[in-house]
């Protein structure tokens, strides 16, 4: 079994640069765009990348050599002489910065056969202008990219304002009635994220291809919202009025805390990851209390709630502009990629179950990500352009 991992070690005492800054600087080096000062910064940094493998097998060594050779063919160090240690570090970061996703394993799973993932079924509601849309309680749709900052509407005493590009805020007043049922909905298409500040002060970041339904003002004894897709919540504390997130047969209840929920329809599971505080996950009559760094997984056809320990910060890398893959199949990887880059994905070949892991900057071009994946030698891609970027297809080949 292959078990190759890439780890990033950062000397926190020096605080020389963040991991994101380090990744971006190394990517500039790989692209031949570093100036002399940046070169010095890079190679004198206390940051170091190491390949770690406690139980390396001959297959692992072959895979490392294969990846190293591929990187060697791709990268020109611009006449910078590296010693053996730094050359290896450069090779490792090249894989990371180009999203070359080194964690590779074979996993026993039921093979699904050739499969095509269609845009509509995979990605939910697609807007006519592929822009975030706010739907008011009377059915009015507001294309958020087309409106200026400022007051958009009033819903039964609650002001709705666009306060910045990609950010919406609700402000409830004393005029908000106790029997208010003014429900709003925000729909985020592929390739976008959005932040909403609800009337109670709760902050919600929505990932691509997500929909959140919520009242313009929270009245009554609870604060209830509904989610499809993925969102990170920072819930305003209110001990007398619990905050609840509803997704199909699963409900998450909190009083005030930070957590992430991934509940895409095409994933067939719901993941709730707690960053701080505590939450209660209820699913088909089963309940679990989560502590920080707990992740609860529920599925539609199973009453059990699977509880795992995880690094909760990794669940919100999307919020900070990155993909993070950890032991994901190529289908799981491409599911996220398709939501962001607005693709149709087609699978050809044996549909192998190799696992990938790594980090990638979502602001980079699709072609760079696919090129990075191909450097592993485990998968190949073909891009078929349509009449627009919305009609692109990526064919995945073993």
Image (cartoon, helix red, strand yellow):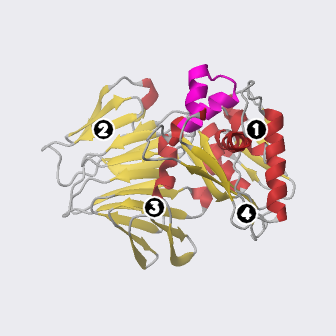
Point out which mark residue 169 bears: 2
Q: Residue at x 74, y 24 (%)?
A: 78
Of callouts 4 and 3, which one flags the residue occurring earlier in the amino acid sequence? 4
Q: Is residue 394 magenta?
A: no
Report crowding for label 4: few under 14, some 14 to 19, many 20 or more residues within 10 A (C-alpha): some
Query: Quadrant location of residue 147?
Result: top left
Of callouts 4 and 1, which one flags the residue occurring earlier in the amino acid sequence? 4
Q: Are marks 1 and 3 in contact (CB under 8 Å)?
A: no
Please name the residue that numbered disc 1 is placed on: 371
Of callouts 1 and 3, which one flags the residue occurring earlier in the amino acid sequence? 3
Q: Is residue 23 magenta?
A: yes
Query: Quadrant location of residue 175?
Result: top left
Is most of the magenta stretch helix, strand or loop?
helix
Q: Residue furthest left?
A: 174
The foreground one among 327 and 237 is 327
Q: Is residue 239 left or right of residue 287?
A: left
């Amino acid at each position: 079994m292959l078990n190759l991992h890439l780890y990033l070690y950062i000397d926190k005492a020096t605080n020389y640069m963040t991991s994101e800054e380090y990744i971006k600087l190394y990517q500039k080096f790989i692209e031949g765009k570093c100036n002399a000062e940046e070169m010095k910064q890079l190679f004198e940094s206390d940051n170091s990348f190491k390949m770690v493998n406690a139980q390396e097998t001959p297959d692992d060594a072959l895979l490392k050599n294969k990846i190293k050779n591929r990187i060697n063919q791709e990268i020109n160090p611009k006449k910078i002489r590296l010693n053996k240690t730094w050359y290896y570090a450069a090779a490792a970061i090249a894989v990371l910065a180009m999203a070359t996703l080194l964690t590779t394993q074979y996993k026993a799973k039921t093979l699904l056969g050739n499969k095509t993932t269609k845009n509509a079924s995979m990605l939910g509601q697609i807007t006519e202008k592929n822009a975030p849309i706010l739907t008011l309680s009377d059915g009015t749709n507001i294309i958020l990219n087309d409106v200026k900052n400022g007051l958009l509407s009033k819903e039964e005493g609650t002001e709705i304002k666009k306060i910045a590009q990609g950010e919406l805020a609700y402000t409830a007043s004393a005029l908000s009635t106790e029997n208010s049922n003014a429900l709003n909905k925000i729909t985020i298409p592929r390739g976008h994220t959005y932040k909403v500040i609800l009337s109670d002060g709760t902050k919600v970041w929505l990932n691509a291809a997500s929909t959140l339904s919520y009242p313009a003002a929270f009245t009554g004894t609870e604060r209830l919202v509904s989610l499809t897709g993925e969102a990170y919540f920072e819930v305003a504390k209110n001990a007398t009025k619990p905050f609840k997130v509803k997704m199909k047969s699963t409900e998450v209840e909190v009083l005030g805390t930070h957590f992430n929920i991934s509940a895409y329809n095409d994933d067939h599971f719901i993941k709730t990851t707690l960053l701080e505080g505590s939450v209660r996950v209820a699913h088909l009559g089963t309940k679990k209390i989560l502590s920080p760094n707990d992740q609860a997984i529920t599925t539609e056809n199973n009453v059990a709630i699977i509880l795992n320990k995880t690094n909760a910060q990794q669940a919100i890398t999307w919020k900070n502009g990155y993909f993070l893959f950890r032991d994901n199949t190529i289908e799981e990887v491409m599911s996220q990629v398709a939501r962001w880059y607005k693709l149709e994905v087609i699978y050809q070949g044996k549909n192998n179950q190799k696992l990938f892991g790594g980090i990638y900057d979502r602001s980079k071009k699709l072609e760079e990500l696919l090129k990075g994946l191909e450097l592993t030698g485990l998968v190949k891609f073909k891009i078929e352009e349509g009449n627009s970027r919305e009609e692109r297809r990526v064919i995945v080949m073993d």
